Amino acid sequence: MFTVLRVQDQTSPCYYILEQHHYRELDEALLRRQIPQFSSLNEAARAKAFKRFLRSCTVFDCGALPHHLPNYHRPRDKYGRKIALSVADFRAGALALLSVGEFFQDHSVGFSLVADLLGGMWCTKLRALEPCYQPVTSFHSTASQIEEALTALVRAVVTRKRWKHKRIKIRRKAALDYRAKNRTLPHHIQDFSRVKIHVPRGGGPSLKIPCSYQDTVALLIGASSQQLQEAAPYLQNAAVLLLNSAGCAELKGRQIRSSAIAAYDSSLLETIVQERGRISLILDWWRSLSRSRYAKQIIHAAKESFGPPDSRYVAVTLDPKKLNQAIRHQLLLAFLDQMEYYDLLTSEELAAYRSAIKDIYDPEPLPEQPIRHADDADVFLEAMRALAAQSSIAGLDEPFRKTDKYLGAWRVISGERYLVMPEDRWAKAYRKWVREDKTIDSTLFQKEGWEKALQKLLVERELIKAPSAGSRYRYDLYGLGKRDNTYVVAVPAALLSLS
């Protein structure tokens, strides 16, 4: 006879079986060994066989895991009495949380962090409505200050590490440092998150299992791909910050460039540390507002921001990255609206934050610029000036050889100074320069013989030296007496603003 523990999880009951003084999850592999032909039964028959197996075991009901673990720990006075909270506490918490948006010089990173924290508090309901929503942000930085800042932030959001319920004790850290001190023993999720369930007398030792991160935030530092895959099922309903961690398909989110977090305001870090209790308070209050209709409004507004779909298509699937960005935007707007609705912040105070958020998520469209083409005169002259300034050019009296890496040479022809370049070198350099500028239409280079066609236009516009006949100019650039075989492009120095 087996001893089985029944624990009600977030959605369904889980069963654990005692084997050799240790509990393991009661899975199908074990049932196949205990129940004849179990794998060949249909769904209804497997359910009946499982119930019969449980009747043959000693089953202990260990209750249910809590659905809600409050992040906020209300302070008490020296007599153990809870300290009364005031509007000033909520107001200070809101201002400290919003200051995170201005922590980095790139405000889009800071406000994205704030949005992920807000979404993390509502993550269960938001993901139930939109499974592709994932408040995951990945950072890579060797600066110790970045680790200090992110650690301080998650500890400001989650001020508790331990929770206690009937026969259940939970220990869970918000900052998961996977950098193993002992290289032979890598960390696992149960090193940071553990539920200890006391089993009734006669049932065996206590049950110890990892605890899910539900409607909260977690920071993972230095985790490998394997460690992330192990932790992913426990983090799917929480905001996740990854610092110097590997990639993982289950925890894919926004990647932050190192340059975007290189500059930050250290004084705001002090504010986060000092106001950690109030930041946790305002986010705990925000989580209390996570009713289904609010979550539906967020998702609906995010999808509506893309405009009506084209009626010609049967189905339209939104880009997950853009949809996540739209959800972040709506979460920030909803939070600011609630601050004003409950008179925690005035409309004048919120105006600056609304303006900053609009500039990041809904900027005014830039005025349309006329399209520039590779065969425009101004584009040609701009490119030649840049190439003349950036490239190596042989001097007036300096020889020019095919083995040299010069783009061209300065030469005086008929009393006028020119930048003379071999056709092939000029064409390669000009095409590369134009294609690097994404604002210039470079379809010209897709046409066969574009070099000759462009030279003809340039000769007509008097931008390059014209031959006596045709549009290709010949010059003895190499000084070998082979003028007839040396085709060049010669640009007047006067047009390049060079004397």
Image (tube, rainbow, N blue to C red):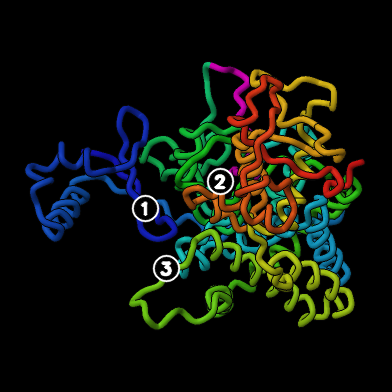
Give, as a three-letter code, the residue at label 2.
Answer: Lys
Viewer-closest of 411 and 380: 411
Compared across the picture, whether 434 is left or right of 207 comes to right
State the SS at label 2.
strand
The quarter of the displayed image where residue 295 is located: bottom right
Q: Position of residue 94 (x, y in %)?
A: 80, 66
Residue 33 in which image quadrant: top left
- Is tag 3's residue or tag 1's residue first in the polypeptide sequence? 1
Which residue carries the number 1 mark?
61
Segment colored magenta: 169-183
Q: Where does the image place residue 303, in percent across and percent down from the top left?
A: 53, 74
Label 3: how many residues lie within 10 Å, few (<14), some (14-19) or many (20+)? Answer: few
Give the number of the disc on residue 334.
none
Residue occupied by mark 2: 169
Q: Please report whichever mark, 2 or 1, sits nearer to the chain's N-terminal start.
A: 1
The percent coordinates of residue 36 (x first, y second) are 8, 42
Amino acid at the residue labelled 3: Thr
